[in-house]
Amino acid sequence: MAIAAYRNAPDLAREMHTAIGRHTDKSYDWDAFPGSRGFPELDRAQMRYIGAGGSPKVDDPNTLKPGAFTLSLIHQPVGKYAPCHSHEVVEHFLVLDGALTVGWAFGEDIIEAKLGRYDMVLNQSGRPHGFRNDGVGPVLMSISVGSGSPKPPVYVCHPRDGDPERARRFGAAPDRILALGRDSDDARQQQFAGYVVRYADRRPVWQAGLARLDYIGAAGAPPAGYRMEMIHLPRGVAVCGYAQASEESYFVLDGAVTVGWEEEGDSAEQRLGRLDLILTPPHRTRWFRNDGAADAVFMRLSGGGEGEEVRFEPA
């Protein structure tokens, strides 16, 4: 709907409209990361929703202002990679399509894990890591970092250092690459395994007619600045309004979700489709329901780290 249609709408409806990122209104930026310029093997594209993430393009007028976290999509073609680097904050990758190889550096050793659809890794702050597409199709993933204004990445091994093949291996010699083993007694393996979340291993908690799958939180990777869960919302299910002290985002992965806001007796609603997002400010009463033709899935990101927990009540 055109912005002009909101000129005579209540203030809450106008504010809600400006808090939504529509996938169809956005485009991919193939020049989002200065460290990749001049190196075609590093090609990847970013679509920004909340903040700029690891890109310096913080002045993008089409992205929502970040608070405790950012959110963007990354499209990585077959054969491309991101060299080993670190951040001063946590960063998670949630794979939406394709298969992604992620590597963590432990000195001269690299431990690699392969992630499929709806698998996630939460990269520790300060932990050198990289990712690579060894599959037969492009990877699409969502990336969030635990700061509205993260510092530029610090590269550990980059192809500009003179050895592109070593950079592709995230800095390891061929005989220093290990596959992630969850049953290993190696402390490094155990540490990495605690930050890799497999969709197939999630055990849903059913509440108010919907299923909650913890990704970053008590039953997932350790929270550090924000929490993340996946919500499976069957047709016809709705929750009552609730509020929390931190900002919160819904990012629709499948189906359609109707979201609502309420403030001082006024209310507004919008419907979100696949890869649409809404960012709700702190203390705003909000709700959601599925009045579509199929079940829906969305990612729920919320600030606050280990603090606040929400219990949904059926509407």
Image: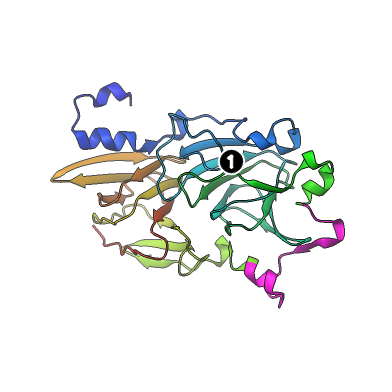
Is 33 on the left or on the right of 16, as rendered? Answer: right
In the picture as drawn, the residue positioned furthest to the top comes out as 4
Q: Position of residue 111 (x, y in %)?
A: 73, 62
Q: Which residue is mark 1?
A: 74
**Which stretch did the figure color magenta?**
171-191
Report the residue at 40% width, 39% height from top: 65
Position of residue 36 measured from the top left corner of the image (x, y, whole percent): 69, 36
**Which SS class for mark 1?**
strand
Which residue is pictured at 32% across the width and 44% down the height? 258
Residue 59 against residue 139 in the figure, above or below: above
Please tell me whether residue 180 is drawn above or below residue 2 in the rendered image. Answer: below
Count of residue discs: 1
How crowded pointer 1 is (Cα within 10 Å; few <14, some 14-19, many 20+) is rated as: many
Percent position of residue 45, x then y: 61, 35
Q: Residue furthest left?
A: 265
The quadrant the N terminus occupies is top left
Q: Is residue 188 magenta?
A: yes
- Expressed as whole percent of the image width and height from the top left, the position of residue 152 reads 59, 43
Q: Determine if the magenta segment contains residue 219.
A: no
The scheme the figure's colours follow is rainbow
Q: Quadrant of the rendered structure where residue 158 is?
A: top right
Residue type beneath disc 1? Ile
In this rendering, does residue 117 appear at all?
yes
Q: 311 and 144: which one is in front?
A: 144
In the figure, is residue 204 to the left or right of 185?
left
Is residue 253 rendered to the left or right of residue 95?
A: left
Q: Does 1 appear above or below 187?
A: above
Name the residue: 52% across, 33% down.
Answer: 57
